[in-house]
Image: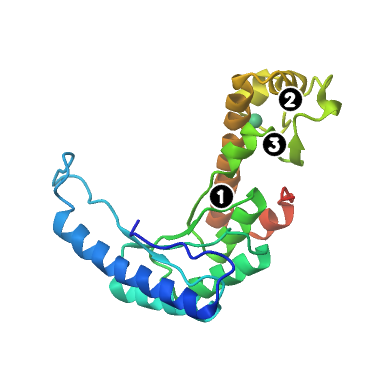
Amino acid sequence: MAFDECTEHPAEHGHTRDSMEMTLRWARRCKEYFEAHKHDVPWYSPDLPDQALFGIVQGGMYADLRRESAERTVEAGFPGYAIGGLSVGEPREKTREMIAAALEVLPKDKPRYVMGVGYPEEIIQYAAMGVDMMDCVLPTRAARHGLLFTSEGRLNIKNTRFAQDQGPPDAACKCKVCARYTRAYLRHLFVSSEPLAGILNTMHNLAFYLDTMRAVRHAISLGDLSGILAGSVSTSA
Ligand SMILES: [Zn+2]
């Protein structure tokens, strides 16, 4: 990833523009340095593809700046493009609006990556909009706080109602945790502050996210995302 400034939120238009201009200057400098030095790494081999340096679209919560940032980052020329500076406290509708503004400009034949999102139903929506890649701390951080993402929605494992629950965390999940452990056991680990609680919750949440993306890829291969969009369970607060 090229060096960028994640503009704080909220921020005035003028300040956001200045911040975006700095990110654009950095993008060009990063690219120049990267092109000159990309083979100066111990693992360099002519048989391996070069690493791909992505440019990052900024522009805060202003659609005009998002479009301009995307246009000028594309002018600089990168093998892939990221949309950064989102999920910084803005409403979800605004996040979607900013992603849409950048996607209008970013080329469809290059990977398009939204940084730092999201809940399972959001990653389905963004994929349907044309986003190829996403990354987020949410599945692991939520796991450490006892939050499980399941096919039935969000589940807080510390809840007393799971104390005697002998069912798996998610009956529809094929992960190792769901195959072996009960909700009651995961709750016991969590309320006992056992580090294993965070590990097992994380394994399940990552499996759920991977299953979600597998389902998205399958729907894309069938050319129809309407079913998966309609079936996505809201897991946000
Ligand atoms: Zn599972």
10 Å crowding of disc 3: few (<14), some (14-19), many (20+): many
Marker disc for residue 147: 3
Whether tag 1 and tag 2 are in contact, CB under 8 A, the answer is: no
Q: Which residue occupies 64% across, 39% down?
A: 142
Label 1, label 2: how far apart the Cα atoms are: 26 Å
On the image, the x and y values in percent for residue 170 come to 72, 32
Whether tag 3 and tag 1 are in contact, CB under 8 A, the answer is: no
Q: Which residue occupies 42% across, 76% down?
A: 18
Residue bearing the label numbered 1: 218
Dot 2 falls on a residue whose secondary structure is loop
Picture quadrant of residue 224: bottom right
Look at label 2 and name its amino acid. Pro
- Which of pointers 3 and 1 lies earlier in the amino acid sequence? 3
Residue bearing the label numbered 2: 168
Q: Is residue 144 left or right of residue 81?
A: right
Look at label 1 and name its amino acid. His
Is label 1's Cβ within 8 Å of ligand 1?
no
Dot 3 falls on a residue whose secondary structure is strand
Q: Nearer the viewer, mark 2 or mark 3?
A: 3
Is label 2's Cβ within 8 Å of ligand 1?
yes
On the image, the x and y values in percent for residue 119 come to 64, 50
Q: Nearer the viewer, mark 1 or mark 2?
A: 2
Label 2, label 3: how far apart the Cα atoms are: 14 Å
10 Å crowding of disc 2: few (<14), some (14-19), many (20+): some
- Which of pointers 1 and 2 lies earlier in the amino acid sequence? 2
